[in-house]
Structures are given as C-alpha cells and as structure tokens.
Amino acid sequence: MNEKILNETARAMVAPGRGILAADESTGTIKKRFDKIGIDNVEANRQAYRDMLFNTPDFEKYTSGVILFEETLFQKSLSGVPFPELLASKGVIPGIKVDQGAKPLFGGGAEETITEGLDGLRERLQKYKAAGARFAKWRAVIVIGDGTPSDYAIHTNAHALARYAALCQEADIVPIVEPEVLMDADNSIEICESVTDRTLEAVFHELYLQKVLLEGIVLKPNMVVSGAKCPTQAGVQEVAERTLKILKRRVPIAVPGIAFLSGGQSDQLATAHLDAMNKIGGFTWGLTFSYGRALQAAALKAWGGSNVEAGKAAHLHRAKMNGLASLGKWDKSLEAA
Ligand code: 13P
C-alpha cells in the first residue's frame, strides 16, 4: 500500500470546484434509463451515450473523476481511444464499480440486502488497474422500513464495505465507500438522520478494525432527507444542517473528502442541498458530488439517442451547476442562464 498515492488520488477526486460523474450503471440499470427514451439497450448505444458524456467540451473543469462500469472500462470511444485513456488525457481520473450488486440478505428484514463481489476481487482489481482505473466504488444499500434497518444488515454491509476498501488500498486504488441509506420510503427526516448516524458509526468502526487508511478513501453517503413518500418534506436548509450534523459526528477529519450520491433527488434539489452545505461550511473535508441520475437525467433526455450536441450542452450545464455548488457559489438564477 502506497499511502502517498492513495492520499493524492483521494484529494484530487474532491479538488475544489470539481466532483465525480457516476456513469457506472450496470447493463440492467442503463436499460431502465434507455427505456425511458425508447433506446435499445445494445452495446453500440451504451458506447455512443458514454462517448457523448465523456467528450463534452469543458466538463473536465467540473469533473475530477468518472466511475465506469466494467464494460466501459474496456471499451473504446467512437474515435477508437480506450475510454480510460480518453478521460485521463483530459485530467479526469477513471474509476470502476467493483461490487456485483445488492442481493437478498438471508435472515434479514423485508427488502434487506447484502452487497456481493468480494470473491476474486483482489485479482479483478489488478486487471482494472492495468486498464487505468485509479479508484473504485462499492455500494451498500440500507433500507428504511417497518423494523428496518436491522443491526444485522448494517453490520454485514459495513463489514463488506471495509473488506472491499482494504483490498482496494492493498492495490493502491482509492475506495469510494458508499453506504446508501435509501431515500424512497415514507419516513420522516428524523428517521433518516438516526439511520444515517447508525450506519456511518458502523462503517467507520469496521474501517478502523480492518486497518483501512482513512486518508486514502472518499466517503459517498446519502444526504439526510425526508423520505420521498413522506407527506412533510424538509426544506433545503434543514437538510443541509442535519446532514452536516451527522457527518461532523461520524467522519474523522483524516478523510479527504465526501462526495454525495443523489439518490433520486431532482437535479436542482441535489445541487441546492450541496450548495447549502458548502455555504454553511465549518468542515475540513472536500464536500462535493458523485451523482448519477442528477448529473445525467437532463443529458440523457436531450441526447435522446442522436442529438449529441444537445446532450453535451445539458451535461455541461449540470456539471457546472454542481461544480459551483461544491464551492457554495451556486444560485438558482444561474439555472436559467
Ligand atoms: P445516483 O446519484 O443516481 O443516486 O447514483 C449515484 C451512484 O453511484 C449510486 O451508486
């Protein structure tokens, strides 16, 4: 493990004004996105779509890294350049999703899952590194429901996240540690706050037990929000304050940065929340984005399978808005510009 490489890479991933594009949808997940715009989920379309995103002029000003799905890591752009090489030539760090999905957790509560993918991971990481990946991602899913999450689900997922993180660091690959408390139930913001608190406590405990170098990770958490089906929705300021409260309680200052997932929030709300937290300030980590849907939804729609220029313009706009939010310099009036 090279502590210097890990720390430098992690810091570059959360450099001021930049964040991470999560373009690592599995073949199954991208199908759901393509279905919405009536595009066939074939390799040529996946390649063309990612080619549009990664060739957006100037997106690198706001984008420190891109998380790729395995197929994309080994794929070439339409002009024949391997995607990781294309990204690296723009100063964008290529990363790779290495988990193999959330599967039902035996003996767990309703809907509870455990993320799989540890078997053979050490060997896969060497293959990904040779292809240019310098960071990785593993997503654990924590479900809020009647009697859930169980301590069992939190513990097993935290354990797997830490084991993954240790294997990545052994290979000098920065692990993005992603414990995602889902935002789609009818729970209050108070419940989301306490579940996020329990989850992060368990995750950092496991990272410590498994000797993960905190200076060489990026945390990718959910924000503390009202569940999407909750009749009362907390405002932007409350979300920002509650999220920061829990992060300050649970995330040591040794961690270089925190890059949020968007989790189904609307594009503008995801930007507004990030901006509000950076306006409040008072923390040492870089606080930025690692959005999938909130960076891509508008671009995907504008592209629609063929309109490359419109897709690029929509992508650049959202990347820029989130880059500003990572500095606390976003304003709603800029959305119309
Ligand atoms: P969303 O921003 O769409 O939640 O996706 C981020 C991600 O990488 C989830 O694993």
Image: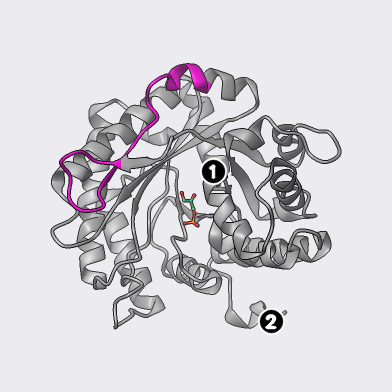
Q: Which residues are magenta?
A: 104-125
Q: Which quadrant is the N terminus positioned in?
A: top left
**Is the residue at mark 1 in contact range of ligand 1, meaning its CB lies under 8 Å from it?**
no
Amino acid type at image mark 1: Ser
Q: Is residue 125 visible?
A: yes
Which residue is at 44% across, 22% downward? 121
Please say if 207 is above or below 251. above
Q: Earlier in the sequence, mark 1 or mark 2?
A: 1
Q: Residue at x 61, y 60 (%)?
A: 35
Q: Which image quarter holds the C terminus?
A: bottom right
Instruction: Tell me the quarter of the picture where residue 314 sits.
Output: bottom right
**Gap between marks 1 and 2 measured at Cα:** 32 Å
- Residue that badge 2 annotates: 336
Query: In the rendering, at what x and y percent does residue 278 appear?
Result: 47, 65
Residue 178 in the magenta stretch? The answer is: no
Q: Which mark is residue 26?
A: 1
Q: Secondary structure at mark 2?
A: loop
Q: Is residue 165 above or below residue 37?
A: above
Which residue is depicted at the point 54% across and 18% down?
Answer: 126
Callout 1: 10 Å neighbours few (<14), some, many (20+)?
some
| Type of amino acid under label 2 | Ala
